[in-house]
RNA sequence: CGGAGUGUGGCGCAGUCCGGUAGCGCGCUUGCUUUGGGAGCAAGAUGUCGUAGGUUCGAAUCCUAUCACUCCGACCA
């Protein structure tokens, strides 16, 4: 491609509303242009990158045996009512009406439509397993779109849906997608980590997220450097930090702690470790009668060690809290504990369900609120001072230094950007009453899995992970152009023009995706543009080097600090091997 | 949705408090010079000051409403 007949549109300053580096660089390099909140034009340079990601995804989906199709962006509401998600999804799903006031949605995902396709066209176990995928625009009306295409409302996603006749097949389908994802992100040249994930509101049994490692990532990943354990924060299991409860050694003491309601302050005041304190979190659930009317609220007291944080996803798994909970109101707290928040504790409470974190359940001689303003109890011991907790559960967030749940080391935490997610055991076939005929001639329910990759988010995540103060540093596989030829004085020097054009033609013939920057820009402006856009391999051709010996040019990899002088005659071979080499590095 | 803030040329901003007919930098156009890291000089083009209403002799500026956008929080297959 010649730059003069292409469209390069860069900005020196990023628009004021851009706040993350990938968004700024995508806007400045002319990859995207904002059209509305969370909705972007993909400009030519950006679309090239997206197409390259899509191409790799397609190749690996096909290799894994998935079959491409395309479902409409606009879908009828009926299917979503049938699965129950019409009510469940909330305002995040954009609903529209046609001229006859029929309800439609803009698809946020396509489980229902794929289940419907299965219902119409798959009748026999002989047709299974099958896996359909598409690369399609999605719309999720995020409450607060931000970070450019990282959390846009409209975005491009690859979504695949597998159907199997039995658990064994479902496992194989899942593994095939998992392995395809590993291949995809390796080929894209990204540093990433698959982590175990909670299945969340989509439902299902088994789930992994594929996270691109980046300090600016929104998700916290918990992993064990000495084993293959990795999970996201919501899911990461926390074992009890105290193996067995020590016997009581202190007397129960009511200690004045005026004006100190936080665990940190109490620990400082009493000159004890924060890990000797226990914090109280009060939740409420509604008691309903059979008609669903609210009879009253049930109060729950969750106990977490002072230096830990509550994990609400885990709390949601505790029996009795599964159907949703809320934080108790101040009035409810005063009614149940006879005290304002800040000095709450599990001693002497009635009609409160007490849930202790695994670690808390094994603590002894600990400190909690005394349910009296400005007082805490110290030397608290289970069994002696209060009954054993009603429930012991893992309800806290992991912290760095925790033992790995596989017993093979110590956990660390890093941040990531979720770019892919695989699920198995989805409930939609049951919800929609979908069956096929099994070998025994009887109807069976297929096992469904779904597998997403946020194509546009991959692009942003790649930039978050790979950039410097000058601009983007694309991995070769996603770069809009693999190689750029930057002639100095293209309009003036016949020698430069000829050398640049010859090299350009030769590289094109070698099937290398090459851009010839024949805009005749001044060198400073041209090189700044090319570095901003992030083309990984660059050849600079100028009279100065051409006149040296038999004629030299400069090669520079985008990450290199200084250029390498090479012979013009060797340039094609040199670039070809440089491109080969960096692609192999990405795969290693 | 709660809180905060911003809308002035393609981008970044000043002007608003204190009303007097719109300005700066970048970019863009033309010419000349320049050409190995975002050139210089000269001449130019580009604005319903988000929108609607009001106050006033006069509104970017004051008042009211409205829309859009952004940030923090909550939320998030």
Image: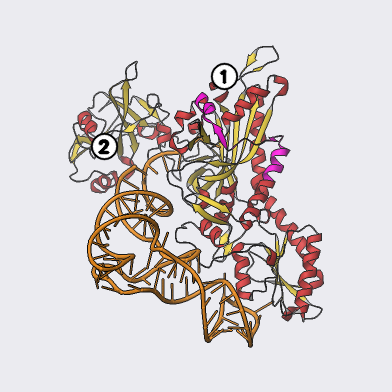
Q: Quadrant of residue A444?
A: top right
Identified at 54% across, 39% down, the residue is A408
- B19 or A398: nearer the viewer: B19
- Compared to residue A559, the image places residue A315 above or below, namely above
- A362 or A429: nearer the viewer: A429
- Compared to residue B72, the image places residue A79 above or below, namely above
- Compared to residue A514, the image places residue A266 above or below, namely above
Give the SS element for disc 1: loop
Specify the label residue A433 is tagged with. 1
Circle 2 residues within 10 Å: few <14, some 14–19, many ≥20: many
Asked if badge 2 and badge 1 are on a common chain, one would say yes
Residue A145: percent from left, percent from top? 46, 48
Identified at 69% across, 46% down, the residue is A56
Specify the label residue A219 is tagged with. none
Q: How many marks?
A: 2
Magenta segment range? A56-82
Residue A249: say if magenta. no
Query: Among all residues in the image, which is located at the extreme top?
Result: A441
Specify the label residue A368 is tagged with. 2
């Amino acid at each position: 491609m010649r730059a003069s007949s292409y469209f390069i549109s860069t900005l020196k300053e990023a628009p004021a509303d851009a706040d993350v580096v990938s968004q700024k660089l995508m806007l400045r390099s002319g990859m995207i242009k904002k059209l509305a909140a969370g909705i972007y034009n993909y400009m030519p340079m950006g679309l090239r990158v997206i197409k390259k990601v899509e191409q790799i995804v397609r190749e690996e989906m096909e290799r894994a045996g998935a079959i491409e199709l395309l479902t409409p962006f606009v879908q009828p509401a009926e299917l979503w009512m049938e699965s129950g998600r019409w009510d469940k999804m909330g305002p995040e799903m954009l609903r529209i009406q046609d001229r006859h006031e029929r309800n439609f949605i803009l698809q946020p995902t396509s489980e229902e439509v794929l289940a419907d396709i299965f219902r119409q066209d798959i009748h026999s176990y002989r047709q299974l397993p099958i896996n359909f995928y598409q690369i399609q625009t999605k719309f999720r009306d995020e409450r607060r779109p931000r970070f450019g295409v990282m959390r846009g409302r409209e975005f491009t996603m690859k979504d695949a849906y597998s159907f199997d006749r039995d658990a064994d097949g479902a496992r194989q389908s899942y593994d095939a997608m998992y392995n395809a994802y590993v291949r995809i992100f390796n080929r894209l040249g990204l540093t990433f980590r698959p982590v175990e994930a909670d299945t969340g509101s989509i439902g299902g049994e088994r789930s992994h997220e594929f996270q691109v490692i980046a300090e600016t990532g929104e998700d916290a990943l918990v992993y064990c450097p000495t084993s293959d354990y990795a999970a996201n924060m919501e899911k990461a299991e926390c074992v009890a930090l105290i193996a067995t409860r020590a016997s009581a050694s202190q007397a129960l003491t009511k200690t004045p702690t005026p004006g100190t309601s936080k665990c940190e302050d109490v620990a400082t005041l009493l000159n004890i470790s924060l890990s000797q304190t226990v914090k109280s979190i009060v939740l409420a659930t509604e008691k309903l009668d059979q008609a669903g009317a609210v009879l009253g609220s049930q109060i729950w007291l969750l106990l977490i060690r002072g230096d830990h944080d509550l994990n609400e996803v885990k709390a949601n798994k505790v029996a009795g809290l599964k159907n949703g909970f809320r934080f108790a109101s101040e009035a409810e707290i005063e009614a149940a504990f006879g005290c304002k928040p800040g000095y709450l504790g599990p001693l002497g409470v009635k009609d409160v369900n007490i849930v202790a974190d695994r670690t808390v359940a094994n603590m002894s001689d600990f400190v909690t609120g005394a349910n009296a303003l400005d007082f805490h109890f110290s030397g608290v011991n289970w069994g002696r001072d209060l009954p054993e907790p009603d429930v012991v559960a893992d309800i806290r967030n992991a912290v760095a230094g925790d033992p790995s749940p596989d017993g093979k080391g110590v956990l660390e935490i890093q941040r990531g950007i979720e770019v892919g997610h695989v699920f198995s055991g989805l409930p939609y076939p049951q919800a929609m009453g979908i069956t096929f005929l099994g070998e025994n001639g009887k109807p069976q329910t297929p096992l469904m899995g779904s597998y997403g990759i946020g194509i546009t988010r991959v692009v942003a995540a790649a930039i978050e992970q790979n950039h410097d103060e000058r601009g983007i540093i694309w991995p070769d596989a996603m770069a809009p152009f693999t190689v750029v030829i930057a002639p100095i004085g293209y309009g003036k020097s016949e020698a430069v023009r000829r050398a640049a054009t010859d090299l350009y033609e030769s590289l094109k013939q070698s099937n290398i995706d090459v851009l010839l920057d024949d805009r005749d820009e001044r060198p400073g402006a041209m090189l700044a543009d090319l570095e901003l856009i992030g083309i990984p391999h660059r050849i600079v051709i100028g009279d100065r080097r051409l006149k040296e010996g038999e004629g030299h040019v400069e090669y520079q990899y985008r990450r290199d600090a200084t250029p390498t002088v090479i012979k013009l005659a060797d340039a094609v071979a040199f670039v070809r091997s440089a491109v080969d080499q960096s692609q192999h590095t990405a795969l290693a």
